[in-house]
Amino acid sequence: MSRADVEIAGSGLAEVTCAWLLAARGHRVRIRPRPDRGRRPLLLGAPTLALLHSLWGTGSTAGPGLVTHELTHRRAHWGAAPAAPRIAAPAVVVDGARLAARLLDRLAAHHPDAVAEEPGGDGLPQWTVTAASHPDDRRTAGRRRLLAGDTALAPGQDDTTARLACTELAWLHLTPLGDGSALLQAMVPGPAAHPENLLGRLLAASTLAPRLLGPPAAAVSLPAAPHLHRTPATAPTTRTPGRLLVGAGAIRYDPLSGTGTAQALRTAVLATAVIDAAAAGTSPQALCAHYTARLQAAFRAHLATCARLYPQAFPSTAWHHEIDACR
């Protein structure tokens, strides 16, 4: 089998995982890390951790110093339905930026050529793999925003259970981070001019308020509607490399699903398979069409789930646009 020359443009979990898988298959890989974006808490459930470990050949933990807190249970109260019982749901809180950096170190230790500073190979790469994409090239299903900020748990509160609650306008998720702190997130159906004020009002109207000392002093508002890139895969030509988008650059699920990291890792696996099969002689055009079709099918299935769940919790007109965008 021929070896492909691949440039990995970025160093998020999807990009470094794709680099790791390709290098393990003997392809020539060169990674261009992007600057660290700072602390990024991730809640990883047992299935996502198992996938991560299987891809990277690591042990049963995320690595020394990476896990900042362990959760054992979750409890959800969705809309007007009765609160669900507290159920076992093992998960860990990790810093996503530190996790990606640790995996990049593992890549460098096993495949030093992939992270060498001096360029290698002749001419253009055959493929570029990246999570960077332009918003105008995406199909976005809605305009909802995720508000997020850190705050302190009230004394004596359970810090091993993640909790989901709803108000008339939003769903809220509380993730204990350890050391008495918690991440509070809320999904709202549109832009928020003052996210910390709105997050505080939503918290006060929710069942989560008694569990915290108060609302976050500062909050960010992030785009959170599901999106799919219109052209997540393009085949190489004689003049340009092929391009495969991975991670959130290719497809993003609603944060309610809790599967964003797992989905990012799956795009890395699929992108690796495309490059591997192309090097073995399969038509790159056919492979890119398959990559696109797989992502489109997953996106449609996710939107169908959103269109079923959101009307159950939010009958108000404020959510009509978001629900219609998922149908």
Image (cartoon, helix red, strand yellow):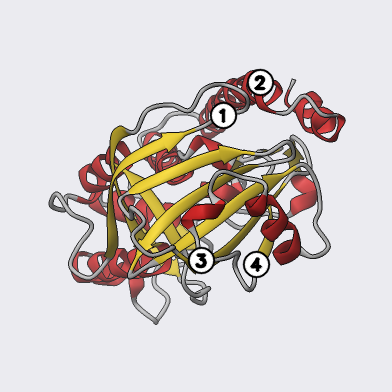
The crowd level at tag 3 (other Cα within 10 Å; few <14, some 14-19, many 20+) is few
Q: What residue is rendered at 27% in x and 66% in y?
A: 66
Q: Residue at x 29, y 60 (%)?
A: 69
Q: Are marks 3 and 1 in contact (CB under 8 Å)?
A: no
Q: Nearer the viewer, mark 3 or mark 1?
A: 3
Q: Amino acid at mark 4?
A: Ala
Of the image marks 3 and 2, the number of the one nearer the N terminus: 3
Kind of residue sitting beneath label 2: Gln
Image position, residue 168 (x, y; %): 73, 36
Q: Position of residue 14 (x, y in %)?
A: 43, 52
Within 10 Å of disc 2 (Cα), the crowding (few <14, some 14-19, many 20+) is few
Secondary structure state at the residue bearing disc 2: helix
Q: Say what secondary structure mark 3 lies in.
A: loop
Residue hosting label 1: 78
Q: Nearer the viewer, mark 4 or mark 1?
A: 1
Position of residue 81 in the picture relative to residue 322 (left or right): left
Sequence-wise, which precedes: disc 4 or disc 3?
3
**Amino acid identity at mark 3:** Leu
Which residue does the numbered mark 3 point to in the structure image?
213
Residue at x-position 42% and y-position 76%: 119
Which amino acid, mark 1?
Answer: Trp
Q: Position of residue 45 (x, y in %)?
A: 33, 42
Q: Nearer the viewer, mark 3 or mark 2?
A: 3
Q: State the image quarter where residue 115 is shown.
A: bottom left
Mark 2 highlights which residue?
312
Residue at which label 4 appears: 219
